[in-house]
Image (cartoon, coloured by chain):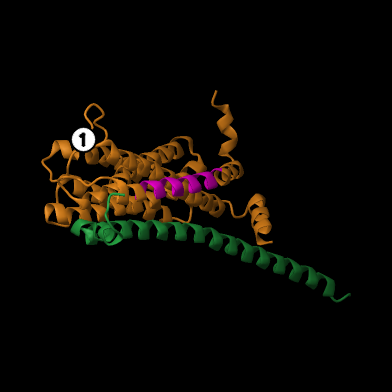
Chain colours: A orange, B green
Amino acid sequence: MWKWLHPYAKPERSYQLASTLLPWFAVSSVIALTIGIVWGLAFAPVDYQQGESYRIIFIHVPAATLAMSTYMAMATAAFVGMVWQLKLADAAAAAIAPVGAVLTAVALITGAAWGKPMWGTWWIWDARLTTELILLFIYIGIIALHNSFEDKVLAGRAAGILTLVGVINIPIIKYSVEWWNTLHQGATISKLDKPSMPTEMLIPLLINILGFALMIGALTLVRFRNEVIDRNSMRPWVRDLVARESK
Amino acid sequence: MHFESLSDFFAMGGYAFYVWLSYGAAFGLLITLTVVSVRTRRNLFDQIRSKQAREQKLKEHRQGNKNNEPKT
């Protein structure tokens, strides 16, 4: 049933697939983000408690939630790489890590810039903020491990172990607002029975989450192609590719 | 449009600094990541190209030596 997947274990096939998908992801993410950001910044109504400062939500929430989803995607790739020794899975994990790190940094910075006017402080060592900072450190550790070894198989294994151990942090981030007393507010969107957000705010937020997800896909594809080229630079198909693009 | 005027929009109800700091930082970081990721590809291609050129040169050099060998 899953046999159609087998040819994609070949770097060349995966590279071609990434090249085919890339423009679709790139264009659709730019469209979604443009609509979402303009809508969120200029057209969504004002929040009765937080005033205009709440507009930070339109980047803070997509960055923060997707930083965790991205981690799970990376962990899945790392797991596949470790169990089935698929080199391309390691390449995918290595490609995702910097994207996740930047998302986490965006979540932390926008969170601080939102915390200052609302809580009166840029930073506080409470559960949600601290675990999110740990997520950033784990991402940086994974990137460092990927770059620490000339041998990519070894690098993939070392980074893979850290990635899988770091998965423990994800549920802790998610439930930190319930397990501990924290300044950070609880989940807003996932309470489907009683959404705590009016539709005019929710729609641009959802569009931005979609836009961020597509952007993460596009960036991962760009970086995945780089990883594949880097790991296969001696192969004839890469040389042909380079020769074709030099013309 | 939620805002009355353009200056109203930029003022963000007094939260201009925090709102624009957030959007600016996010935009800056994501653009930087994009530029770096795209540039990596070009650098890799350049490396492979120069390696190929070096190999080609070596090959020609070796062949050249063979032809110039003095006949004994």
Is residue A39 part of the magenta span, yes or no?
no
Q: Measured along the vertical axis of the image, is residue A120 above or below residue A153?
A: below
Q: Quadrant of the C terminus of chain A?
A: bottom right
Q: Can you tell which quarter of the image residue A109 is in?
A: bottom left
Element under disc 1: loop
| Secondary structure, magenta segment, majority class | helix
Q: Chain under label 1?
A: A
Left or right of A72? Residue A88 is right
Q: Position of residue A160 (x, y in %)?
A: 39, 44
* Residue A174 sits in quarter: top left
- Residue at horizontal 62%, vertical 54%? A234
Residue at 38 percent across and 48 percent down: it is: A159
Q: Which residues are magenta?
A: A21-37
Examine the rendered structure and indicate whether residue A147 appears above or below residue A78. Answer: below
Hey, what amino acid is under mark 1?
A: Ser
Q: Residue furthest front?
A: B4
Between B4 and B70, the one lying in front of the other is B4
Q: Residue at x 57, y 33 (%)?
A: A6
